[in-house]
Image (cartoon, helix red, strand yellow):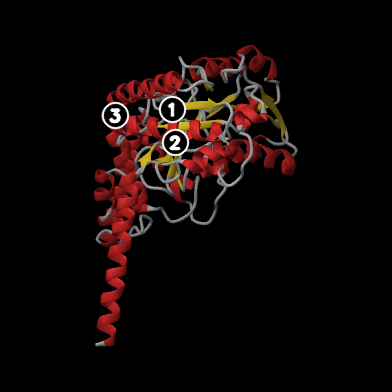
Amino acid sequence: MREAISSLLRSSVLLYAFYLCQVKMYAMIYLDYNATTPVAEEVLEAMLPYFRLYYGNASSRTHLYGWDAREAVEQARGQLADLLSADPREVVFTSGATEAINLALRSLALCALPEKRHFVTVRTEHKAVLDTCAWLEKLFDVELTYLGVDAKGHIDLRDLAKAIRPDTVLVAVMYANNETGLIHPIAEIAELCREKEVLLFCDATQAVGKVEVVPEGLGIDLMACSAHKMYGPKGVGALYVRRGLDLLPQLTGGGQERKRRAGTLNVPGIVGFGKAAELAAGRWRSDGERLKRQRDWLEGTLLERLSGVAVNACREHRLHHVSNLRFSGIEAEDLLLALSTKVALSAGSACNSAEVLPSHVLKAMGLSDEEALASVRFSLGRETRDEDLAKAVDDVVEAVNRLRKG
């Protein structure tokens, strides 16, 4: 009897906690889709059987359980390849974009040494790129050139051309910036890299599934992406590797993924990634049109209702769903705390959210510490409704006015 009562109490507590979570979630407006996206219902449905029913190891080649898992992985590989208009054999599954970035940069550096040891990248890259470059610089004496950007976040292609040397291994430029949404002219950058006979690596984590990204058509040699930025699960990503390129694995011990990345494959996650890619292929264009309209309305309304607001990016060349706004006279951290139970926002990359420091991206664009610390990123998504934005704008305006009054 005691065990039954205890079990009933535990169940009641869990149900109540679930209810509170639902109430809290529905009460908040989520505008932090660049940090992560909710898993789409279709993605979750596709994944669930691979936790209990088809739980085989994709490397088990002697029975049906393994065959089913392998077939599911290859189907997902094909779904992601279709989204990228790529050959499935060019897709390497990883634990996320960070691992994909590490695999690409470390492998190329180690393959090129000692004859070539020079990398070119941009000061506004994600920390996964910058920190990996710094690691290579420290441990393997790789030489780095960090390109600056202008006030809108653009690099000067003339600076890039001058930076490339005879011993340059590759150029690393992200497709779209995670903080400002700025889209770099990747096709032009790739053409320059081909002329100079160097490789181009592209972190396309924020772009894949949101806009059309065709690495072969653009001239990209290696490209990282992640499932959880496009309504798939966390813990799975991919590296596109152009046909003919060899990679030195950074994880060894099994020979999986054509000997490019060892380790037991995350079958449920990969299945989810594939389904997310399939969904994105059918709706990125219509989603983009709606999100651009919503984003433009959000910006225009805040600029109209509040003084001292500025957009931190080039308005013409950025992702449809991203807006980085600067609110003079306040600190972003205070605004985020004031809105923390109403609107989910961020001051920049989720990877740096534990530290209250000025964004390295905004600093590279010429903003002062004070201006960078007054900036907030809004990122919209599939589940963002017009009424959500109207309520969010009201909350932001009220919070900014209150903070400015002191």
Q: Residues within 10 Å of mark 1 (few under 14, many from 20)?
A: many
In the image, is residue 20 above or below residue 162?
below
In which quadrant of the rendered image does the N terminus lie? bottom left
Amino acid found under the numbered disc labelled 2? Asn
Give the residue type at disc 1.
Val
Disc 3 + disc 2, Cβ < 8 Å: no
At a point 61% along the width and 40% down the height, the residue shown is 106
Task: Return the x and y of residue 392 as percentages of the image width and height.
Answer: 38, 33
Q: Is there any visible trace of residue 170 in the rendered image?
A: no
Q: Nearer the viewer, residue 187 or 285?
A: 285
Frontmost of labels 1 and 3 is 3
- Work out which quarter of the rendered image holds the C terminus and state it: top right
Image disc number at residue 386: 3
Depth order, front residue of 6/274: 6
Circles 1, 2 touching at the beta carbon (< 8 Å) = yes
Closer to the eye: label 3 or 2: 3
Dot 3, how many residues are within 10 Å of its Cα: few (below 14), some (14-19), or many (20+)?
Answer: some
Spatial CA span between label 1 and label 3: 15 Å
Q: Is residue 156 left or right of residue 384?
A: right
The residue at the point 41 percent across, 53 percent down is: 265
Q: Which mark is residue 34?
A: 2
In this orientation, which residue lies closer to the viewer: 291 or 301? Answer: 301
Q: Quadrant of residue 173?
A: top right
Q: Earlier in the sequence, mark 3 or mark 2?
A: 2
Name the N-terminal-most of marks 1 and 2.
2
Name the residue furthest top.
158
The residue singled out by tag 1 in the image is 322
Q: Position of residue 151 (x, y in %)?
A: 60, 17
**Amino acid type, callout 3:** Asp
Please state if 374 lies on the left or on the right of 94 as rendered.
right
